[in-house]
Image: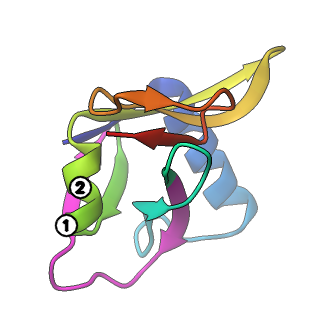
Amino acid sequence: MIYVSDKAKLKVSKLMEEAKIPANDYFLRVSVVGGGCSGLSYKMDFDNEKKPMDQEFDDNGIKVVTDLKSFLYLVNTTLDFSDGLNGKGFYFSNPNASRSCGCGESFAV
């Protein structure tokens, strides 16, 4: 399962509304790609095309889709959003990460 916090839900919904993206037809695609100072980075996009091996979750009213390979790194991860003084943006609370970089944008397992 991939979880979505209340703050992340509000921000995702607001972004979709501002971009006039129909929530019924689109979902949030989350993936893991190679790169970053720790070796792996998170990637998020709005998408409307599912692939055969995609894993689909619905948490807190947000549909999240990920490819099977990325899901292996994202099991039980929570997508959150911070608008505090120390940083603004989405971040992942990933229990599978053995270490992450200082900026929080990449991780290693």
Q: Hey, which quadrant is residue 18 in on the image?
A: bottom right
Q: Which contiguous range is marked in magenta?
A: 42-59
**Residue 76 position within the rendered picture, expressed as x and y whole percent measured from the top left:** 22, 34
Instruction: Give the camera-side residue of 28 and 24.
Output: 28
- State left or right for residue 82 relative to residue 64: right
Residue type at the position of mark 2: Phe
Q: Is residue 3 left or right of residue 25?
A: left
**In the image, residue 34 lies at what x, y percent?**
48, 63
Furthest residue in direction right, as rendered: 85
> Quadrant where the C terminus lies?
top left
- Please tell me whether mark 1 sits on a helix, a strand or a loop: helix
Residue at figure coordinates x 50%, y 37% from the top left: 9
> Total marks drawn?
2
**Numbered label attached to residue 71:** 2
Q: Secondary structure at mark 2?
A: helix
The residue that label 1 is drawn on is 68
Front residue of 87/9: it is 87
Q: How is the image coloured?
A: rainbow
- Callout 1 crowding tier (Cα within 10 Å): few <14, some 14–19, many ≥20: some
